[in-house]
Image (spheres, rainbow, N blue to C red):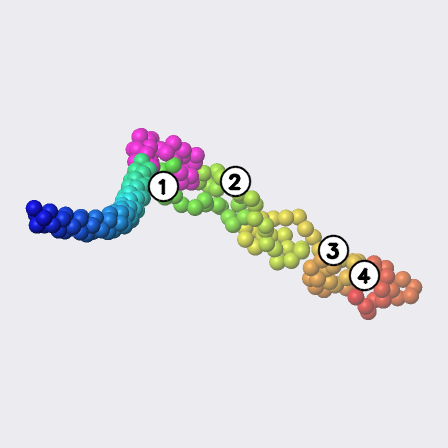
Amino acid sequence: MKITMRATSIIMAILLCLCFVGCKDGKENIVNTPSENISQPADSQEKENTDLSNKTESSEKTESTEKTESNQKTESSQKGETTSKTESTIKKCTKHIYDNACDSLCNNCNAKRKVSDHEYDTPCSTECTVCGYKRKAPAHIYENSCDSNCDLCEADRNTSHEWDNDCAEYCNKCFEYRDTDHGDTLDENGNCTLCGKPADNNN
């Protein structure tokens, strides 16, 4: 009986030791487990953030590409419409109308035609002989102040020489020379009665 009780006591002691060891291991597992669980969600969160960033960049690139393609299509469409409208306007103009024979643009559709320059009778003429267009009259050109005919168009003008007296040899305006003699009548001092100068002086 004593032996049995002793054996029972030994078994109980062994069981207590085993329980103590088991509880200690359990606590270590409990302490280590939260750390692992905490570190694991942090890695997962970082991965999720990276994936979200990549998705955002991809979405922005897609939107930018779509906008660029849309703008290019719009510009191309507008150019095509403008060209089409111009061609359509020209085609619809069944009869071109111009202001005159020298006008190069149609009044209805702006179609351009090739025409010659205005034509004038002389370099100094003001009215075109083809369409009647009037330009500002160019200046006549003369050899000197007393020249009565334009060198470009031969137009006449009223002008005359100016002399100091009837016996003067040079015109006051153009300095043209003329050969003159004093008149036959002299005064008592021997001076010309026309110019008042001595008969031997024509200046």
The residue beneath circle 1 is: 113
Q: Where is mark 3, residue-wise?
A: 162
Task: Say which residue label 4 marks.
Answer: 183
Mark 2, other Cα within 10 Å: few <14 / some 14–19 / many ≥20: few
For the record, the magenta segment spans 82-109
**Callout 2, which amino acid?**
Lys
On the image, which quarter does residue 196 sit in?
bottom right
Of the residues shown, which amino acid type is indicated by label 3? Answer: Glu
Which badge, 4 or 1, is on the more N-terminal residue?
1
Q: Earlier in the sequence, mark 4 or mark 3?
A: 3
179 in the magenta segment: no
Q: Assign a secondary structure to mark 1.
A: loop
Residue underneath mark 2: 134
Of residues 82 and 90, which is closer to you in this image? 82
* Amino acid type, label 1: Arg
142 sits left or right of 85 in the view: right
